[in-house]
Amino acid sequence: MISFGSGADALTFDSIHIILFLLLVVLTAVVMWMRQTFNARHSGQVIMQEAETATLRGRLEGELESANRRADEDARRFAAKQAEWNEERGRLEAQRVEERTRLEAQWKEDRATLSNRVEELSKRAETAENRLAAYEAQSEERAKAVEAERQSLRAMAEDVQKRFQHLADEALRKSQNQFIEMADQHLKKHKEGAEGELKKLMQPIQESFGHFHEKVESIQKITAEERSSMKEQMRNLMENVTATQKTTSDLANALRAPKGGGRWGEETLRNVLEMAGLSPFCDFTEQTHTANENGAIRPDVTVSMPGGRQLVIDSKVSVDSYLSATETEEVSERQTHLTAHARNIRKHIETLGKKSYWDKLQDTVDFVAMFIPGENFYAAALEEDRSLFDFAAKNRVIIVTPSTLIALAKAVAYGWRQEEAAKNAREVTDMARELYSRLSVFGGHVAKLGRNISQSANSYNDLVGSLEGKVMPQARKFEAMGFNSDGKALPKLEEIEDRTRELKQGRDLLFSEIDKADAENTPRDKPRRRA
């Protein structure tokens, strides 16, 4: 034990405390050494890291600057592209507005033309209807007048016969009375006259009486002939009236029959289409059966339109009520039949609208045309129901009559003629383009041939120049030395002076670049088909 100091304040350390103190000192020294070593090593690493950081920073700054330059260049390109896009979009927008304005103006013009045409045709139809009504009224008046004339002629003939009979009797009676009076007078005056004198007096009277009797017989004969002729004419007139009534009745009965009326409507529709210049089986087809997932349909007529579109026309409208109205004389019954006629047409319009041909047939316009085979049928229905046309338009049904359908069919025929002309123009354009392409190839071959000819001429001239300059002079020395035993002299070689004319771009047959530009700027024609 070791003691420091004296008394109570003395510190006492045993061996364990000394060892612990020494260990603490050693540990402190080791820690200080390790700290110095770590600081030195850490300083080196920091320096290396700072150098690497500076290198990386420089590299990153360079890449950042390069990226900024690329970004600026991309931004400039994007701005240029955006300007081009904006310019192209403005040009396309201007073209679209111009095209839309042109189409709207054309549509308005076509609509006005069609409206004027429809109005004119409606007026013509109304005039024809009025004329037909006037003709029917005149026919009735003529029939009544003929009947009255027949009765009058019959009464007149009877009256004439009675008058002639009366005149004949009166004349005979007067003649007899005069004769008796004259005979009495002559007998009283000339009782003693001779018989010859009496005969002379009787002869003029007998001749006069004979002439009068002949005239009466002639008049009676003429009257009988005229009466017979009048009866024959009246019989023929009655037969014609009966035949006309029978024909009218047969026609009305035929039109009332479902098949007869349908055939008449189909025949009228076919005649109108052919009159407009359309051909069956080419421009239009009849009773074409079509079956798909939506069901089977069989439209009366399908008209092929330019551009591959189709127009369906129906001709099964019923006119029974109208025919019944024309046959009756009662005003109330006639009005009832006309109302039923308008109601039947409205019902048929609704049926056609529900068939939806435009959904069941491919490339079909979004409406169906309902054909009424007479202007009078439609006019009578429209007079009873003013909203018939608007109702048809709401159901996608267009009502057409012979006058309006022929205008529509002529428009379709004109469209086909324009389509054919456009097709011919496209074919001519394709042929011209093909000829142009072949001429371009031909021009290239001609240019290549010209270049080869020029190269051959240049090679020939070089060869001639070389021979004449180096070889032929030495050969001619042999000729001077007497080696020319057969007397043939060496020919003099001359250069070719003519040169081939160079083909000029844009004027001769070198069209390759122009043809490429034309091919790039020429849009492709869309194929169109015609049924």
Image (spheres, rainbow, N blue to C red):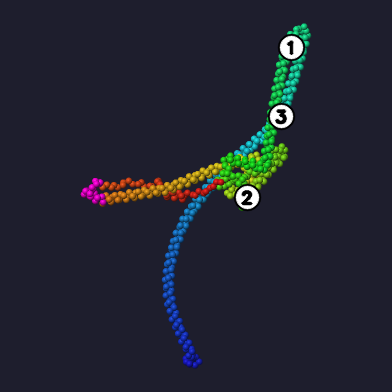
Label located before the other in sequence (2 or 3): 3
x 66%, y 44%: residue: 345
Residue 202: mark in rendering: 1
Outermost top residue: 192
Tell me the SS state at disc 2.
Answer: strand
Q: Are marks 2 and 3 in contact (CB under 8 Å)?
A: no
Name the amino acid type tagged 3: Ala
Q: Amino acid at mark 2?
A: Ala
Q: Is residue 196 left or right of residue 429?
A: right
Q: Is residue 497 magenta?
A: no
Crowding near the residue tagged with mark 1, few <14, some 14–19, many ≥20 C-alpha atoms within 10 Å = some
The x, y position of residue 241, in whole percent, is 69, 33
Say which amino acid is labelled 1: Met
Q: Which residues are magenta?
A: 471-489
Q: Is residue 381 shown to the viewer in this render?
A: no
Q: For the point 61% across and 50% down, which residue is it?
A: 291
Q: Position of residue 435 (x, y in %)?
A: 44, 46
The picture places residue 429, in percent across and down from the top left corner, at 47, 46
Q: Quadrant of residue 185?
A: top right
Whether residue 1 is visible? yes
Q: CA distance from mark 2 to mark 1?
A: 105 Å
Residue denoted by label 3 = 148
Report which quarter residue 221 is drawn in.
top right
468 or 10, which lies in front? Answer: 468
Q: Nearer the viewer, mark 3 or mark 1?
A: 1
Point out residue 217 in the picture as x, y percentages from the top left corner: 71, 20
The residue pinned by badge 2 equals 296
Please report contact status of discs 2 and 1: CB closer than 8 Å, yes or no.
Answer: no
* CA distance separating discs 2 and 3: 60 Å
